[in-house]
Image (cartoon, helix red, strand yellow):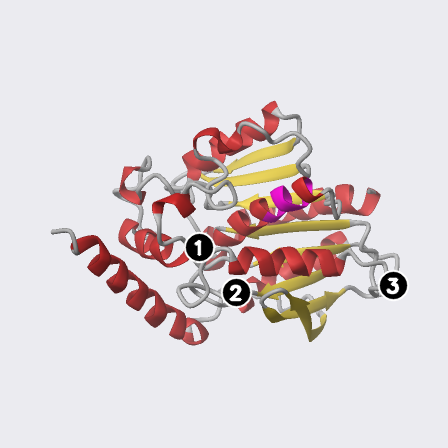
Amino acid sequence: MAVMPNLYELAARATGRAMGALSRRAPAPRRTFSDLPADTRDITVPTRHGQVRCTVYRPSGASASTPVYVNVHGGGFVIRLPEQDDAWCRYLMTHADVVVLNVDYDTAPQHPFPISVEQVHDVVVWASDPAREWDGSRLGIGGQSAGGSLSAAVARMVRDAGGPTLALQILHYPVLDMVTPPNRKPGGQHNKVPPPWMSRVFGLCYAPDSATRKNPLVSPAWGPNSENLAGMAPAVVVTAEHDALRDEAVRYARALEGAGVLREHHDVPGVDHGYDIQDRTPLTTERVYSLLAGHVRRVVQQS
């Protein structure tokens, strides 16, 4: 009996590797915003874990005074598909008039915690350098699902390190509690996006041991990890009504509010995890994107 957890973890990591290998073959997002032209190019950014590819989205008329936003895609820390956020990056670039960096970070199980979060952190530090082609002093970060988790972690890291300053963090249906088993989360037994077994696999790939899952950079909404949020970047938290991750994000939003750093918590009715990628409710997706772009425009542009 003692070997079963090890066998389960090995099976989970093998499943994670297979899913990661299929990342590039995943279907394209349904929403493209192809009517929004974008000046894009790929660059590589040096990090403590090697070079990381980022796609740069430049708005028309961008200059050295244009703010910058670092986008962190989702995928359970395992699926490597930054292209799924192309529509959002185009929308944000156009409607908030910011340069967007879409980060292609390394994924688990080959690259477990803390590799991806440290890579994203290093991209943020690099982007803040005054030598860049944009204004790194006006800087935001955000992501959805696993990308929201990584964004929350980086916001904590820069707060604790004393910089660089983030004007805004956007946490879009984020993963914020990897201690509580997925099937014990409210709605988790019926959630299909992703199903609890898949969330369990993702968790074991990214943070294999229980001590790691209690780290505040992995589970900022768990237990005492949300007790000291003063000084964090102003936050916008978006939750989905039918998402099994909703409860932990609501808890975190309340903790951010108690620390005086919550700009808005917006709960999207009638939708589940990943609603915008699947685009089953296009009007809802565009309304939420407009809301988020408005926050970026007001906060990052004016910082």
Disc marking residue 63: 3
**Few, some or many residues within 10 Å of mark 1 (<14, 14–19, 20+):** some
Specify which label sits upstream in the sequence, 1 or 3.
3
Total numbered labels placed on residues in the image: 3
Based on the picture, tell me whether residue 157 belongs to the magenta stretch.
yes
Q: Residue furthest top?
A: 258
Query: Which contiguous range is marked in magenta?
Result: 154-159
Residue for point 70% across, 61% down: 100
Q: Position of residue 285 (x, y in %)?
A: 54, 50
Q: Residue furthest front?
A: 2
Residue for point 62% across, 64% down: 48
Residue for point 51% across, 55% down: 114
Q: Position of residue 260 (x, y in %)?
A: 66, 26
Specify which label sits upstream in the sequence, 3 or 2.
3
Q: Position of residue 19 (x, y in %)?
A: 35, 68
Disc marking residue 84: 2
Image quarter (top left, top right, bottom left or bottom right) of the C terminus: top right
User: Which element is circle 1 on?
Assistant: loop
Q: From the viewer's perspective, is 85 left or right of 7?
A: right
Disc marking residue 280: 1
